[in-house]
Amino acid sequence: MNTFITMVTGLGILSVISGMLGLGVAFSAVPFLSLFLPDLVHQVQPLSLVLNGITALFAVFGFAQSGLIDWKKALTLAAITTVSAPIGSWIVHYIPVMMVWIIYLVSVFYLSFRLFKPIQERPGKENFNLALILAVPISILSGLLGIGPGFLLMPTLILVGFPAKKAAGINAFAVVPPSFSALLPHVGRAVWDISLTTVLLLAGAAGSYLGARLSSLFLPNQRLKQGFGALIVAMTVYKILTMLV
């Protein structure tokens, strides 16, 4: 019971912070859930993808209420990510788990670098076509890692000129469909605990909606971003060390 409560509480907190940053919860959920669930590919990744899709959907509601979603661009980007993400999810079944964790660790360090050293916004210089091109490899990588593409799409949208709040709104919508399309290659191989999954989904949905509403009112401060990045790095390094010992 203590483990159950810890998982639900931790996932809820991570969902609030992820919702505020417009990232989707899977990026932090993978190392967190791996502390309790032993099988990365058949337990953690499928659960994280479902959580990512649901939490991102509720984050969309929060951003939409504030009018921060460019629906035309969000729909176009979602179409690209939805088609590309399952490729990575298929590949992950044929490579060593340790290799997946190493790739994940590199991605974590990249995200942390971006959180510690944010990309400068360039209002009025949006290059959406470049974002669409970059979305393909980003989505394949996210499918491989079982996390949804939001962790790289968000900084990419800012890099090509979108303001942070608008980028968060577009990103939140664009990661919902690929979270579920990336789940397809896991069908028939995933191992589910229905009770745990249900409660985690409820906690994640509530947390992400709250985070999105908070982010709509004010941008997360730099210390929150840095602390979140450091936490993900610490969880990932700890998980890899436990596998090596």
Image (cartoon, rainbow, N blue to C red):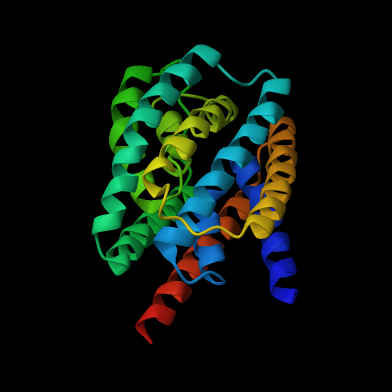
The residue positioned 67% from the left and 48% from the top of the image is 201
Q: Is residue 141 left or right of residue 234?
A: left
Q: Residue at x 37, y 62 (%)?
A: 105
Q: Which residue appears farthest toward the top when viewing the image?
A: 72
- Please say if 106 is above or below 159: below
Judged left or right of residue 66, residue 183 is left
Q: Position of residue 227 (x, y in %)?
A: 59, 59
45 w.r.t. 161: above or below = below
Question: In the image shown, does 167 or 24 lie closer to the viewer?
Answer: 24
**Number of numbered discs:** 0
Tell which residue pokes out farthest to the bottom in this image. 245
Q: Residue at x 57, y 71 (%)?
A: 36
| Residue 83 appearing in the image | yes
The part of the image, by quadrant, that contains residue 6 is bottom right
Check the image and report above or below for 225 versus 78.
Answer: below
Quadrant hosting residue 66: top right
Q: Is residue 24 visible?
A: no
**The C terminus is located in which quarter?**
bottom left
Q: Could you tell me residue 194's position as x and y percent?
A: 64, 55
Residue in front for this viewpoint, 234 or 37 = 37
**x and y percentages locating residue 81 in the rendered image:** 39, 30
Relative to 221, 180 lies left or right: left
Q: Quarter of the image containing the N terminus? A: bottom right
Could you say where residue 145 lies in the image, as x and y percent from the top left? 38, 52
Residue drawn at (46%, 31%) of the image: 158
